[in-house]
Amino acid sequence: MNPSSVASGLQPRHRQELAINVLSKQESVSQIAKQEQVSRKFIYQQKAIAQQALNSAFDKPEKDNEVLYYLPVTQKWIFQLILALILICHCSYRGVMELLRDLFDYSLSIGTVHNRIKEATEKARQINQNQDLSSIDVALLDELFHASQPVLTGVDAHSTYCFLLEEVEHRDEDTWGWYLLEAEAQGLNPDYTIADAGQGIRAGVQAAWGDKPCHGDVWHIFDQCEALCRNLAKKAQGATTQREKLEQKMEAAKLKGKGNQLSAKLTQARKNEAQLQKLASDLQILLYWLHNDILSLAGEDYWLRIELMNFIIEELKLREDKKHKGIRAIRVALSNQKTDLLAFAEVLDEKLEQIAHSFQISLSQVRKVCLLMKKSLSTNRYWQKWSQLYQQLSAKFLPVMEAVESAMKSTPRASSLVENLNSRLRNYFFLRKHLNSDYLDLLRFFLNHRTFMASRVPERVGKSPTELMTGEKHPHWLELLGFELFQRA
């Protein structure tokens, strides 16, 4: 039979099966052609058709050149793009010029960029100065440095609103007092402040507000303790390594009959290793108690914490020596700052007393609910205590638990939020050799009016620090500066 006549009579379904058989490579083209009584050319044609169909099915559609939407580029839009590049993208002035040149085919001088930023700064400064700060209950204060110049920062502990951002010549009592009084003119009158042990900050707070409490920041002492533990652990590990090396040398010397020459050194190395391991272990335990029991938010009352702090201080004093100066540094810091570091416990005690009075239960029961917060939900111990307290308080238990949790959340112990702000500010400062009040005013306005895209605190997501502080919505930060936001049709 003629192969061409056989091929012409094959149905589409049969041709498809031939193509699949060829693509599977289980049989050669010659074998398939012989079995089906068709030409090899015909088989290759079916294979090409099938291959093309497969490529078409799996190829990604070319959409890169598809127009998504049209953007009307006006002078005003260019100006808000400049602001967004500098404030959102941390871009330099020359970077803005380069982007506009390369992507928009638009030339702009550095002077024009500067002038547009200055125009926006005037509006931003006015908004900053008109903001009411009376709702700030706890103010967090700190300092950072840029090119050896101090920058004073102040943040609301609840909303993260930045009420102070100023580059100054000095960070002394007069400077801090001046800027705190300036903020007081806008309504700033917190119940207390939180700051590190810096003398300038504390003297400035006292000069501006008299006897208003300035609590200690536990984060810095925790950081100092962790550094000491790491240092002692490294020294203990080094002593172990030194002892192991001496033991190896001792074994080699014994083979030569000279083992006694290293015995004194090895004895001293073992003694040094044991001492360092004991010291590192003791310090780790003491500082663990400090972190998890004394300076923990959920804990005993203020006066018992003071007694425990004194115990830690005495134990540290017993372990001081000239080789490990870090122990004395922490002991002195705890001695000088213990009342400031534990000031948060007095605040929490007052709140727990109010809860006990409100629910007409004993303070000890409220304290037990507070201590329950320290335990992990995944442990049997937690649920045993939970069950006991539930039986004691019955219907009052869950409301009391919510009240205690709320009281703990509203009692900050550290200036972590202002430290977080300082870390974000450094991403802006590194682009500039010199700062000025105009730039800092604009930056403060932006940080206070941009919305949080993500946060560990769910209540902050989608809101700005200003909205969190005032409880009122406000327009987008670009709209506050007089721009109209682009919206796709």
Image: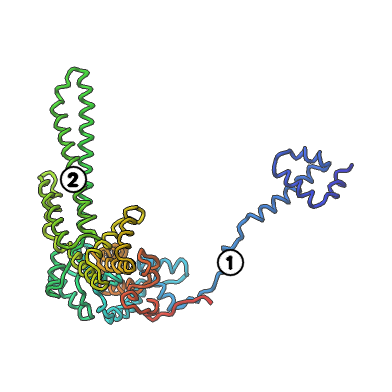
Residue 215 in the figure: left or right of residue 66: left
* Image height of 18 relative to 299, above or below: above
> On the image, numbered disc 1 is attached to which residue?
66
Image height of 207 relative to 340, above or below? below
Tell which of 348 and 361 is nearer to you: 361
Q: Is residue 166 visible?
A: no
Q: Give neighbour class at mark 1: few <14, some 14-19, many 20+ (Cα, 10 Å).
A: few
What kind of element bears circle 1?
loop
Q: Quadrant of residue 280?
A: top left
Query: Where does the image place residue 423, in percent across and percent down from the top left?
Result: 29, 62
Q: Which residue is mark 2?
A: 282
Query: Which label number is shown at residue 361?
Result: none
- Residue 147 or residue 376, whichever sits in front: 376
Of pointers 2 and 1, the one earlier in the residue sequence = 1
Rendered location of residue 447, percent (x, y) = 33, 71
Q: Secondary structure at mark 2?
A: helix
Tell me how far mark 2 sits from mark 1, CA to CA: 68 Å
Residue 143's x, y, as percent? 21, 65
Amino acid at circle 1? Glu
Tell whether 321 sits left or right of 463: left
Q: Quadrant of residue 140?
A: bottom left
Vertical comparison of 400 with 125: above or below: above
- Amino acid type at circle 2 is Asp
| Circle 2 residues within 10 Å: few <14, some 14–19, many ≥20 | some
Q: Is residue 380 above or below residue 174?
A: above
Q: Position of residue 345 (x, y in %)?
A: 20, 64
Which of these two is toward me, 95 or 304?
Answer: 304
Q: Residue at x 62, y 55 (%)?
A: 59
Side (left or right) of 9 relative to 326: right
Taking the spot 12% from the left edge, 73% from the top edge, the residue there is 211
Number of labelled discs?
A: 2
